[in-house]
Amino acid sequence: MSKSYSFLVVDDEEAIRDGIVSTLESVEADFTILEAVDGADALRKISVQKFDLVITDLNMPKMDGHKLIQQVRENVDKDFQPKYYLVVSSNVDPEDFESDVSILNKPFSSDDLMTAVKKIFSNKKKSTSPKKKKKATNKINVDFINPFIDATLEVLDIMCSTKAEKDFVFVKEPDDSFGDISGVIPIRSANYLGSMAITFPESVYLKVMSNMMGEEYTQIDDENRDGVAELCNQIFGNAKGALVNQGYELDMTIPKIVCGEEHIVEHEVDVNQVLAVYFKTEFGSFVVECVLTER
């Protein structure tokens, strides 16, 4: 298992999640591992990121494992459909699932888990026809987004009286859409070129703007549209100091606004992958994403 794989571990019991994650991390392989506390949480994460393998319990609150797989098959875009599933449960009938679902009975050992995971990928590799080689992706610097995470939390709190919380970091395709209004600010310097964007669904944006402006809004209009550009300015300005300390000399630029249902954020550079962060508030979620390349 030498290639890079992305896993999602779904279980409402933290100790079991921790055990699965620790086992996967102990293997000398390039794994990206996210966790979900129940089926509903998993469905949300699967909707925005492609996973090679979803390891899920069956009996969970909010949405069980059966329902999760059913909802993914029926409602998640085919581009985000997980390749395989591994169901871990003390009481499961293999006949209840399709061929891309493997079974691991509880209780299981670390060796049992890794044997099951390796079997999934070795069997599927034999039965799958060769695929065309994908276009090379840009190298993603995870550290670059951390100042933007801190700045977003601070700006939303101070300017908008809105408590936000980082939910999870993921890699998105450049043409994926997540909301109704975005602010996009170019990132430029002698050595770097990129951009940062913040995107809101309309319902979340109107609540944030109502807090920011001290006036209740019911639709995106000329009066509140510029607010997303101001948020971009403030977030970039707050993050700039930390980025300079990391060695990034960046110039201030003017943000642009993009509106419309399912609009696509166009970054300053043409890349294959974009590093993004889901944030959650009491009103709902929004996304901040960044791209940076060397000139």
Image (tube, rainbow, N blue to C red):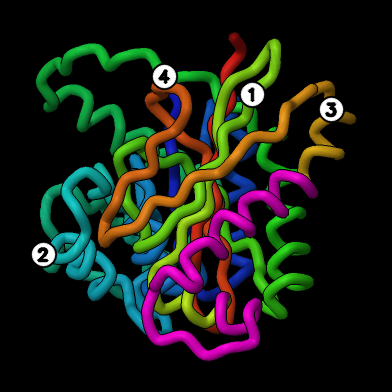
Q: Are marks 1 and 4 in contact (CB under 8 Å)?
A: no
Where residue 66 appears, as percent x and y from the top left, is: 24, 72
Element type where label 1 sits in the image = strand
Q: Nearer the viewer, residue 24 or 201?
A: 201
Q: How many marks?
A: 4
Comparing labels 2 and 1, the label whose residue is closer to the camera = 1
According to the picture, the residue beneath numbered tag 2 turns out to be: 95
Q: Quadrant of the C terminus?
A: top right
Q: Is residue 190 above or below residue 29?
A: above
The numbered mark at residue 137 is 4
Element type where label 3 sits in the image = loop
Which residues, given as a range, are shown in magenta? 209-238
Where residue 258 appears, as percent x and y from the top left, is: 39, 51
Element type where label 2 sits in the image = helix
- The answer to whether any part of residue 24 appears in the image is no
Q: Quadrant of the N terminus?
A: top left
Mark 2 is on which residue type? Glu
According to the picture, the residue beneath numbered tag 1 turns out to be: 188
Comparing labels 4 and 3, the label whose residue is closer to the camera = 3
Mark 1 is on which residue type? Arg
Element type where label 4 sits in the image = loop
For marks 1 and 4 on the same chain, the one whose residue lies earlier in the sequence = 4
For marks 2 and 1 on the same chain, the one whose residue lies earlier in the sequence = 2
Mark 3 is on which residue type? Gln
Mark 4 is on which residue type? Thr
Q: CA distance from mark 2 to mark 4?
A: 39 Å
Q: Is residue 22 left or right of residue 219?
A: right
